[in-house]
Amino acid sequence: MNIETARFNMIEQQIRPWEVLDPAVLELLGNVRREDFVPPALRALAFVDTQVPLIAGDPAGPAMLEPKVEARLLQELQVQRHEKVLEIGTGSGFMAALLSHRAQWVHTLECRAELARGARETLRRSGVANVTVVDCSAAEGAAGLASEAPFDVIVLSGSVAEVPPALLAQLKIGGRLAAIVGSEPVMRARLVTRAGEAAWSSVDLFDTVAPRLQGFAEPTKFTF
């Protein structure tokens, strides 16, 4: 496989058709080596329009999201160089790497120790110096990182049934949160903006499906 041809095709055939047209985002996706963040055994999938499982033997577990989904979320968040970002669900560290090139600092939370170790090492090898990978429990991850709040941007790199109010409260006024919300078969990528002390607005961006983030509450199931 010619790596650079595959990267070019990913951008032109997958990402641009998904309305990702921001030149800075497209340039970033051309420069950050996605293949370095994919498990070695699955490196052939680095530029394929699919989710890439991150733990061997657990295909329903954590995964890198499709390149077009990562790119669209990054574009919609419009991260600026002076901003502080919180990511929940580090996974391989690729989204944190993308965010690091746009933000001043990125705090990223991971509840699986093996993924946190791997992401930390890959980010180090990639020369990324403005990302802190935080080991946490699933419950701690769902609670965010109040000790570093408020944040300009929060990204949930996986799906949740609903975004907890505690996370929304960790946004600055004018801050943005991106999450994939809902339950299969219907999930939607949602962008929430904090408009005031007790005011938020939201817009649904596109339909997709993503693995669940651990630690977040599920809807109550009623029985009759």
Image (cartoon, grey):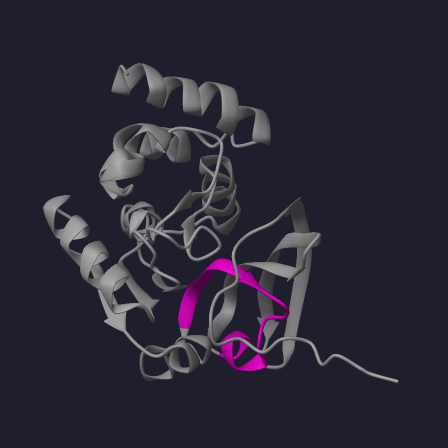
What percent of the width, then of the height, locates residue 169? Answer: 52, 79
- Which residue is depicted at the point 58% across and 80% down? 165
Q: Is residue 128 magenta?
A: no
Q: Is residue 160 magenta?
A: yes
* The residue stretch that appears in magenta: 151-169
* Closest to the observer, 30 or 113: 113
The answer, for residue 33, to whether it is visible in the render is no
* Closest to the observer, 48 or 67: 48
Left or right: residue 43 versus residue 77 is left
* Closest to the observer, 111 or 20: 111
Residue 216, relative to residue 103: is it above or below? below
Q: Quadrant of the N terminus?
A: top left
* Closest to the observer, 162 or 166: 162
Q: Quadrant of the C terminus?
A: bottom right
What percent of the width, then of the height, locates residue 139? Answer: 43, 81
The answer, for residue 135, to whether it is visible in the render is yes
Which residue lies most toward the front here? 57
Left or right: residue 42 versus residue 23 is left
- Choose top left, top right, bottom left or bottom right for residue 187: bottom right
What percent of the width, then of the height, locates residue 7? Answer: 34, 23
Which residue lies most toward the right here? 224
